[in-house]
Image (cartoon, helix red, strand yellow):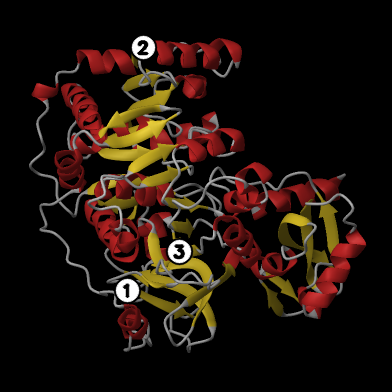
Amino acid sequence: MENQDQVHLTRRDDKVWLKTYEALGINYDIDMPAENTSLIDIVEDSFGKYGNKTAFICMGSQLSFKEVDLYSRKVAAYLQSLGLVKGDKVAVMMPNILQLPIAVIGVLRAGLTLVNVNPLYTTKELEHQLIDSEAKALILVENFAKTYQDIGRQVVDHVVITGMGDMMGTLKGLMVNTVVRHVKKMVPDYKIAGSVSFKSMLKKANPKKYKRPTDIGLEDVAVLQYTGGTTGVAKGAMLTHKNLVANLIQCNTFLGDGFAEFEGTGEQPVIMTALPLYHIFSFTVCGMFGIYRGCIGLLVPNPRDLDSLMKAYKKNPPAFFPAVNTLFNALANNEEFKAMYHSKLRMSMGGGMAVLSSTAEKWRQVTTNIISQGYGLSETAPVATANPVGVDTFSGTIGVPMPSTDVAILDDEGNEVALGERGEISVRGPQVMKGYWKREDATNEVMTADGFFRTGDIGIMEDDGYVTIVDRKKNMILVSGFNVYPNEVEEVMAGHPKILECGVIGIEDDNSGEVPKIFVVRQDNSLTKEDVIAYAKENLTGYKRPRHVEFIDELPKSNVGKILHKDLRKLEEKNHAS
């Protein structure tokens, strides 16, 4: 347990960011609803408000709010008919297809706890998450059914399986499923005893038998959101209804004005939902926020398929585009995307990883849109800080604390450092998780006694409350006693016109302990290692310069586009071993 003396550790009394709030005319305090409110109230309110308006579009097929209401009610009734009760967990394992929001909302409306599952998990990763979460049911797309089958035993009581095209109408759905199964051969053979199909579940379930829970409130756990596991075994962050409702209100305070111009016009703003909804950034900022504001969620099943993404973008030009740096960068360098119509785009929000200034500038040139960078984690539901939309320059910072949120920059002893000094970004607010599921020890490691969540990220706060993220603690490189932060080096090196992307790690060195090594994806094949070294010499101080250069075809990334430095380290170990 954290030392209780931490209550008396040094904390700043002034919230320096309040002057920025005042200058921007934004309210810092949010009004939370009554304690018996939940996400069920949020979605049902939207169903009543937006009715026949479009809620989601995927591959040209769409669902109205009224249809999502009906189908999610059926899912909820089905889950309740299985005997599942408050506290039981239901895992949902799908890419961004129409069935996903139906399943997610159905789980929540049944009064159960949702477990978001990455469909690209290995069998071992899936087994861990299902067992650790104590999931009673699993709803998944057939493309990944064999992953579950290969566990070799039934680790959940109920399995519901869907095909990619199941909600796209009879003819189109049949065509999509046929292509996915037999032409593209994306569905490995599987046999799961006792499983039922998504379509038969909807056909059998009686929405009139749905019983709206009366015992779900803000303090109840809505979602178990598993961390990426980059620092060890994946842990489930317990996100309550309060955490998620608060973050919707907080996001609306910052983003709401960007949607205001659509009100009364009869036109619905489109949210580009390219990032997978099982990731907390997309889940809250695209999925739940879109429902909250009555937007159209434009679902992209595979964000790496740029052709399909751009086809969807062209047909339904978005007003709001949340993405990660790598996706913004890939699009901004794509000739077809450059030629597209971007005048509908009002807001571009970067999260999940640092947005590089070079990427932001390319994006501005292509779309005339300024990327507003935010920051958060699974444990903060997720948005902890953000840049207000509507600014005319890319700040390069992660913005100011969200409304009703305190951010402290702490040293290793837990004391707050002076403004302008580096320390660990720590967050306190209504969006901070209840704790890690069944991991009191891990919870105590990251929570201070006075309620701050220590993020593990290094940052600096300026006197106007804006925070600049430097890097993860674990990625820091120690060169002759000097701290080198890979993100800082990557930011500079990505400015080279012939570098498309780069990732930096530390490697052992007899003289310095460690030195930086850079992995480069070339924009132009004429780029040489000597060019990279020369550019580093011109733009970085001595100890920060990469001493080693390796060209690779693609950087290893997570499913939401984060550069995986741990995989770069594995690649380096493999190179060293050979």
For the residues labelled 3 and 2, the Cα–Cα distance comes to 41 Å
Front-lying residue, 57 or 379:
57
Of the numbered discs 1 and 3, the one sitting upstream in the chain is: 3
Estimate the x, y position of residue 559 in percent, counting from the top left: 55, 42
Q: Quadrant of the C terminus?
A: top right
Q: Which class describes the residues within 10 Å of circle 2: few (<14), some (14-19), or many (20+)?
A: few
Horizontal arrangement in the rendering, residue 281 relative to residue 358 (left or right): left
Q: Which residue is mark 2?
A: 170
Q: Amino acid at mark 3?
A: Gly
* Rendered view: 119 above or below 346: above
| Residue 184 at least partly seen | yes
* Res 374 label: 3
* CB atoms of marks 1 and 3 within 8 Å: no
Horizontal arrangement in the rendering, residue 311 relative to residue 490 (left or right): left
* Rendered view: 57 above or below 16: above
Secondary structure category for the residue under label 2? helix
